[in-house]
Image (tube, rainbow, N blue to C red):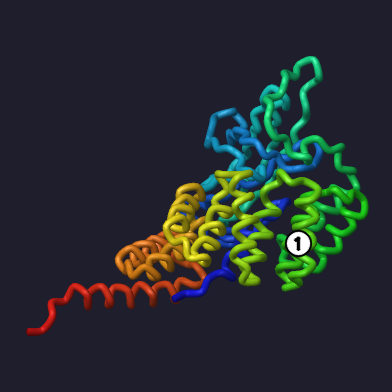
Amino acid sequence: MIHILHAIFAILILGGGAWAQQGESGRPAPGGALHQVRGRVYLPTGAPVEERMRVTLRTFAQNVVSETFTDSLGNFEFRAVPNGTYEIVVWGNDRYETEVERVEVFGRIARVFTQNVFLREKERGDAKPRASGTISLARLSETIPKAARKEYEKGARESRKGNPQKAISHFQRALALYPHYVQALNDLGVQYLRLDQLAEARAAFQRAIEVDPQAPHPYVNLGFLHLLQREPEAALTSLRQAVTLDPTNWSARMLHGIALMQTGDLERAQAELERAISLGPPPTSSIARLHLANLFLRRGEYARALEQSEKYLEEVPNAANAAEVRERVKRLRELIRAQERPPHP
């Protein structure tokens, strides 16, 4: 059985957006390079927007190229974008203005272009009453000081470069300026995880939850930490809360499924892993297929394990563990053929 829990580090939820670097230095696509345009939408407080916002990528002549919606952390992404000058439009609602940012997308090889967007509240006279319901503390908090935001952005850049120790220094400075900075607390915990400083990571995630009990990403990361420390019951508690707060978060669903599998609840684990696959776009969420394949192996359902392993390779043919998965596929095919072979008389 392939042990791939460590691979989940790729989907640790960073408050500042830890984008995978696949494609940044890839080969030119046939007929010219096709790029990715990514970013995050922030509230006026400096926290990422939690509600779904419609985002449009259009040409400078205002011809629509593609549309999408932000996820629960405010992230958006457009793929297969040709060279050109574009506008990113985040459409407003009853509270926020529509925002437009320009992005230049040029390169002979495929690259990832990042453009964040900051929302502005409408004038008080234009605002309509907000819907009732649970409101995150991050939405009610005072504006995060500019100096703290600057330190946070520096930390996020160091994180993307793979420099966790430098990122920690910047996040700590941001927190010294604004101790209730939930994203900085969460991302600080992620950097500690990368350095295998688990006690410090746990403290950071727990503090983030204390500051904002309605923010789902610290629960996801705390649940992952519990899985690392072989504490599936504790992981279930954190991940159940994460799924409750953000039912469309594919990584929370996947980790919840893993925790359920580790506690022996294979039926619910299967449902969660399948839900994760349906929610997350490949290849980002494709890792869930390997966990689902492991579940089918535990139940002796070799054909279904083979199907998930093959789909994983279709979606992520150049994955770091591709050779290992191909070996699994080979052995599963041999096993299935042996089962189908009639017994000798």
Which residue is located at x 32 percent, y 66 percent?
301
Q: Is residue 224 left or right of residue 276?
A: right
Q: Position of residue 47 (x, y in %)?
A: 76, 42
Q: Amino acid at mark 1?
A: Gly
Q: Is residue 265 visible?
A: yes
Q: Seen from this angle, which residue lies furthest top?
A: 125
Q: Is residue 271 above or below residue 225?
A: above
How many discs mark residues in the rendered view?
A: 1
Which residue is located at x 34 percent, y 67 percent?
306
| Residue named by callout 1 | 189
Quadrant in which residue 204 is drawn:
bottom right
Kindly state the secondary structure of the residue where label 1 is placed. helix
Q: Is residue 61 above or below residue 303?
A: above
Quadrant in which residue 338 is drawn:
bottom left
Q: Position of residue 21 (x, y in %)?
A: 61, 60
Q: Is residue 24 visible?
A: no
